Image (cartoon, grey):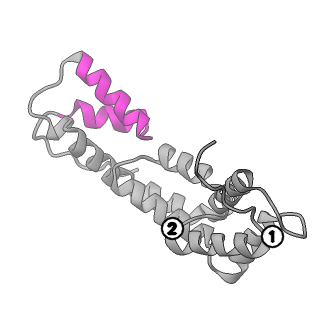
Amino acid sequence: MSGKRLPPPLDEAMMRDMALRHVARFATSRGKLLTYLRRKLRERGWGGEQPADPEALADRFVDLGYIDDAGYAVMKSAALANRGYGARRIDQDLRAAGIGEEDRVQADAQTASAAWAAADRFARRKRVGPYAAGPLDPKQREKAIAAFLRAGHDYALARRWVNAAPGEALAEEEE
């Protein structure tokens, strides 16, 4: 028997306070808050008089403006693009956070407009293409393209960056 005391089961007030602390501390979406609350309910159990309703609590937080999925999507997509990630990877992260299609419209537009700059940041970070010390051998080239694809960039953009000569200035193509 361990000396640890188990925390008491949650009730309405404890779950609300826990959710408030979570949204105050972390930028979060409705889906991520629900995941957090459901995990806490599994870990601690429920001791409230009424059945647990994390969905209603999350909806209340949305109504109060504590959670804004569209704002979260814009913030998260900008942060990921600044780290050099492409549209596919950003879309995966937003889906995992439970962001719906209607809340992703502005974030998707922002991601599309920042695709070239994100690929540039990724190439700089990975030191490929114009940022490489020297030309890549075929195996290194394949690895660099695979890294671009894992980061969510499309194949044509990845090839363009990886095939660029060291020191070459790439210009964004007009579509």
Q: Secondary structure at mark 1?
A: helix
| Residue 3 percent coordinates (x, y) | 58, 50
Across and down, in percent, residue 134 comes to 9, 29
Question: Relative to 111, does residue 64 appear above or below in the rendering?
Answer: below
Q: Residue at x 63, y 56 (%)?
A: 5
Toward the viewer: 29 or 71? 29
Mark 1 to mark 2: distance in Å?
A: 20 Å
- Residue depicted at x 58% and y 73%: 21
Q: Nearer the viewer, residue 85 or 153?
A: 85
Q: Quadrant of the N terminus?
A: top right
Mark 2 packing: few (<14 Cα in 10 Å), some, or many (20+)?
Answer: few
Q: Which residues are magenta?
A: 139-164
Does label 1 or label 2 sit earlier along the sequence? Answer: 2
Q: Residue at x 74, y 76 (%)?
A: 13
Q: Secondary structure at mark 2?
A: loop
Was residue 27 drawn as part of the magenta stretch in this picture?
no
Horizontal and vertical percent position of residue 27: 52, 68
Quadrant in the picture for residue 92 = top right
Give the answer, above or below, for where 93 lies relative to 158. Answer: below
In the picture, the disc for residue 56 is 1
What kind of secondary structure does the magenta stretch mostly adopt? helix
User: Residue at (44%, 41%) from the top-left corner?
Assistant: 152
Q: Which residue is mark 2?
A: 26
Is 142 colored magenta in this rendering? Answer: yes
Residue type at tag 1: Ala
* Residue 15 point in image, percent of width and height: 71, 69
Q: Dots 1 and 2: beta carbons under 8 Å? A: no
